[in-house]
Amino acid sequence: MRMKTKDCFAQEVFVTRPNLPSIGELSPLIRKALKRRQVTNFGELHNQLEEGLREALGVKHVVLCCNGTMGLFLLLRALGLKGRVITTAFTFPATVHAVVMAGLEPLFCDIDPDDYTLDADEAEKKLRKDVSCILGVNVFGNPCDIEALGALGKKHGIPVIYDSAHAFFCRYKDKIIGGFGDAEVFSFHATKLFSTIEGGAVTTNNREIYLRLKELINFGIHSEDSVPGIGLNGKLSEIHAAFGLLSLDRIGPVLKKLQALSGCYRQMLSCVPGLKFQKSRPGSKVNNQYMTVEVLPEEFGLTRDQLHAALKKQNVITRKYFYPPAHRYECYSSSGFARSAELPDTDKVAERILCLPIYATLDMKDVKKICGLIRSIQKNAR
Ligand code: T4K
């Protein structure tokens, strides 16, 4: 399709860009760490960040770690699980790989086709004796059915944990995400609205889980003379913590900007036939870190892949998060848990989903231009 030159972007617009502090903001913190010569292993900035997050998320314990994947893996280990873990295949590879790496087997349940979170009814139907945990993903910041999953966990005496990689500062029933279930895991990667560049955290109100994790992220060491756990190096350095402290300071304006950009997308795209937005769970509040649309090919006139390619031609780099879904990964093609998975809604959403550019430094006029492009691509589709 031909597009007027003025409609195109001269430079690529990515799905996201990191929120970065200036060198002027960063250097006093880093200078202090260098002066102290304590640059990792639970230094002062690390401890300040843990304290700041405890307060911001209203949770008793925060364990900072080197990335969200390590947080997930070590949390699963800390829980001492065996057998199967009920989870979703509509997620980033980290979630399912962490389960498998922890020596556990995923038991996939389908997602709700409107909000993309784990279907709690299906989880209940699939729950069997060898299931030792439920791992929900608060996908694109939309909270799972926390009440239903919590009740299920309680009924069967198994822990319920959340991959909240996307859900920093999201809310469920007026409570901030971080203190739900037995524990939650955040990613603080550079692509996240709150970032330590690489990093993550496990949050919990359970002191036992906290104490076990604290050891596991430090090689399983309890004291100078005692190593009771098989742990790894999952620590967060002072340099990363410095980024986090500065990121925490500016969270309010970032959330406000993302909300405005998301509102603009929704307003300008709601009239386009064949585009469906993710539904939020009633009583929840998302952080708008992701701007997703589902492309319904019959009505839109093009498939998701065709829209993705058409936008790429105009320098708009969208992403197909999360395609392929985990039960379709090549690495699991010989695994029974993947081959036996029947997940029609997961497959359908994964085939149609597209993440549009959204980040705090994106101009509103660029969002309007992207919406204009999508509208004209759709109009010309037939
Ligand atoms: N659970 C869930 C549900 C997750 O989504 C994730 C991570 C995890 C667990 C694991 O958390 P971590 O272990 O990562 O803490 C990115 C992120 O790397 C990943 O953290 C995130 N989810 C996932 C959704 O997105 P990619 O492979 O898409 O990254 P990449 O390099 O293609 O970056 C996306 C775009 O961001 C680029 O097109 C350009 C922009 N970008 C990226 C980087 C790194 C920049 O502008 N600057 C940068 O420095 O995974």
Image (cartoon, grey):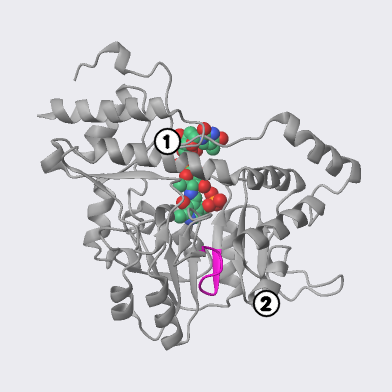
- Seen in the picture, residue 61 relative to 354 is either above or below; the reply is below
Residue 191, visible in the rendered structure: no
In-image side of 260 versus 65 (left or right): left
Q: Position of residue 61 (x, y in %)?
A: 67, 68
In-image side of 192 versus 215 (left or right): left
Indicate the quadrant containing the C terminus: top left, top right, bottom left or bottom right.
top left
User: Looking at the image, do the residues carrying marks 2 and 1 touch, with CB atoms under 8 Å apart?
Assistant: no
Mark 2 — residue? 207
User: Mark 2: few, some, or many residues within 10 Å (few <14, many ≥20)?
Assistant: few
Q: Position of residue 148 (x, y in %)?
A: 37, 76
Q: Choose the circle earlier in sequence order: 2 or 1.
A: 1
Q: Kindly state the secondary structure of the residue where label 2 is placed.
A: helix
Q: Determine the residue positioned at 90% across, 41% down.
A: 35
| Image-quadrant location for residue 300 | top left
**Identity, as a three-letter code, of the amino acid under mark 1:** Val
Task: Say if the magenta span includes residue 177.
Answer: yes
User: What's the magenta bit mostly, secondary-structure-wise?
Assistant: loop
Q: Determine the residue positioned at 72% across, 69% down.
A: 215
Q: Is mark 1 within 8 Å of ligand 1?
A: yes
Q: Position of residue 75 (x, y in %)?
A: 58, 68
- Seen in the picture, residue 24 relative to 132 is either above or below; the reply is above
**Identity, as a three-letter code, of the amino acid under mark 2:** Arg
Mark 1 — residue? 15
